[in-house]
Structures are given as structure tokens and as C-alpha cells.
Amino acid sequence: MTELVVADINGNEEDSRQIETLLIDLDDTLYQVHEAPELVRDKIQAYMKEKLKIPEEDIQKVCLEYYTNYGTTMAGLVANGYQIDFDDWHAAVHGTLPYERMLHEDKAMRELLQSIDLPKYVFTNADTKHAEICLRLLGIADLFQGVICFESLMEEGRRRGIVKENKPIVCKPNKVAFQLALEAAHAKAATTAFFDDSARNVAAGHAAGLFSVLVGKTGTECKADLEMLTLHDLRKAMPGLWKTPADSKHPPVVYARMPLSGPTAAAMAQGVPDMSADVLEEYRRRAIKVAAGE
């Protein structure tokens, strides 16, 4: 167990609590590639047009509404009666991304994560294959005790009777997703630090009792316990994470089967279109309130 002393980038102490486990989002948190959300958005919109036969003029509005109200565009589509082959969706949305061009070994991130002697889990709404490829190319796959992803959340949801006939989609910011993730990591909310680039997901994590950190932006109206522009700032922002017993050991990895003038990377990666700042801000505020249970 680590006594976490949280500080801002200037080193001012703000809070302290015991931290035993880290849950870290993947896309736009462990890495940031500005073109990736746009590519994913275009692929989602193409799938909706070509496979689901949604009129092109309705797609952007549907993406924004479903992302805001259901957590992901896919979750909204399924909730509203669309029949989706999940493997086909993931193959179309992620399977054709230019991974080798976009992602490269991040030695600084590897050194950072490797130096934190606490169990670490990736917690993503994306599919297993996407997570495996990203972590491998970043050179950090072996540093996590597990990957909690689309397949593992849905599988556990089915086992518990939460998911029936592939509905509903279990994903962040849904409270159930956080409960299942904590159980998969053998962790407690009060002693877990959660990192994500989505203000809505961070608000939901905070509401669930996790120490929740917004990555990629600062100065937002989000119930985050801490904000930082990049996970590379972690040592400065949360120095207490490095106060761990020298002989602490953890098991090897096992896969668990931008600015407000435009959509955030998280929103863009769900097909959300470019819209006016006022409209996007209103949807963002509403999404954060929904995630926080207000």
C-alpha cells in the first residue's frame, strides 16, 4: 500500500490517500496521436452508412446523441435496436488503422510505468486486439497485470446475467463497468487511481469513489481529483506513487479477454462530428452530469 501525496505540477500538496492499484485508459491516455480519433470517427460513420444503412444526413447527429447518452456510439446503436456483429464492428473501426505508422516505442512511458511498484491494469472500452497491438507497439505490454476491455466486460456481464442477447453494452462511464473493472483488478474504489482522457469517464470514476485523474486537458468543469496534460507528468503530479516497498512483486501480465472549440479526442473517436463550440460545450456539460449521476 502506498501513501499517495497528490500535488499539482508546481508541487503543491492537495490531497492524500492510500493507493494500491492503477486503472489506466488506453487511447489518448497512455498515448496521444492526434490523427487517430479522426480516423476512428470516419470509420464509425462509414460503418453506420454502409453496414447499418443509416442515412448520411443523420449520422453525425446520431453519433453525438448516442455517445452522450450511452457512453459509446456502439452502445447507443445496440440500445436502439441495431443488430451489430461486434467482431465485424471492431475489425472495421480499429482493424484497418495504420498502427505501425502511428505508434512507436515510448521509452519514457515504459520507464515511468516500470518505476511504479503497484499493480497496473489497462481499462478501455476498446477491443482486445486493438489493445494488444497498441501496447505492443508502445513497448509497454508486459508492464500491466491485466487488460480490462470490451470483450472481458461483456463476457462478465453475460456471466452475471447483466447482458442478455448482447444488450446492454457494458462500457465506461457506466457504473457497472467500474464495478466489474475493480473486481477484475481485485481492487477497492477507495484505494484505486483511475486515469482517462474523457471528462465524462473521469466524472463517473470520481462518483464511484476512485481517485480520478483527467489526462490531456486542464481547466475543465469536471469532477476530477486531478488534471494533467500528459501521463508523462505523473511523477511530478503524484510523487507519492513512488513510495512503495522495495520488495513488492506483482504477477506477469494476463489479458482479461483537445480543446473545447472542437470535440474531444474521446468524443471524436466515437464518430462525434466537428460542431460549434457552444453546442459541444452543452453536450459535454450534460454528459458529465449524467456520468456523475446528477
Image (cartoon, rainbow, N blue to C red):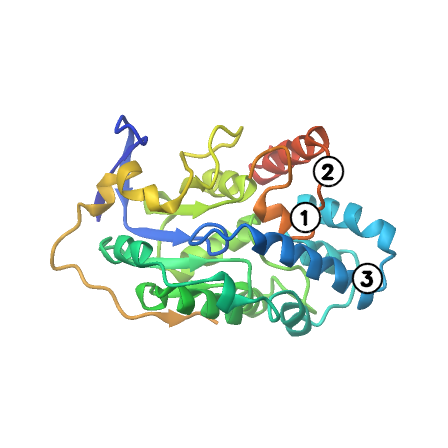
The type of residue carrying mark 3 is Lys
- Disc on the earlier residue, 3 or 2: 3
Q: Are marks 3 and 1 in contact (CB under 8 Å)?
A: no
Nearest to the eye among marks 2 and 1: give it. Answer: 2
Q: Is residue 138 left or right of residue 292?
A: left
Which residue is denoted by mark 2 in the rendering?
275
Q: Secondary structure at mark 1?
A: helix
Q: Nearer the viewer, mark 3 or mark 1?
A: 3
Q: CA distance from mark 2 to mark 1?
A: 14 Å
Q: Residue at x 42, y 67 (%)?
A: 137
Q: Secondary structure at mark 2?
A: loop
Q: Residue 148: percent from the left, percent from the top?
A: 46, 62
Q: Residue furthest left?
A: 246
Determine crowd level at label 2: few under 14, some 14-19, many 20+ residues with C-alpha closer than 10 A: some
Residue 152 in sight here: no
Q: Secondary structure at mark 3?
A: helix
First in sequence, mark 2 or 1: give its number: 1
Around disc 1, counting alpha carbons within 10 Å, would you say few (fewer than 14), some (14 to 19), or many (20 or more)?
Answer: many
**Label total for image:** 3
Q: Position of residue 194 (x, y in %)?
A: 41, 47
Looking at numbered disc 2 in the image, what kind of residue is underneath it?
Met
Which mark sits nearer the N-terminus, 3 or 1?
A: 3
Amino acid type at image mark 1: Tyr
Depth check, front residue: 227 or 153: 227
Q: Residue furthest front?
A: 101
Question: What residue did someone put label 1 on?
Answer: 67
Q: Which mark is residue 49?
A: 3
Q: Are marks 2 and 1 in contact (CB under 8 Å)?
A: no
Mark 3 packing: few (<14 Cα in 10 Å), some, or many (20+)?
some
Query: Separation of disc 3 and disc 2 at Cα?
Result: 20 Å
> What's the residue at 49%, 38% (across, down)?
207
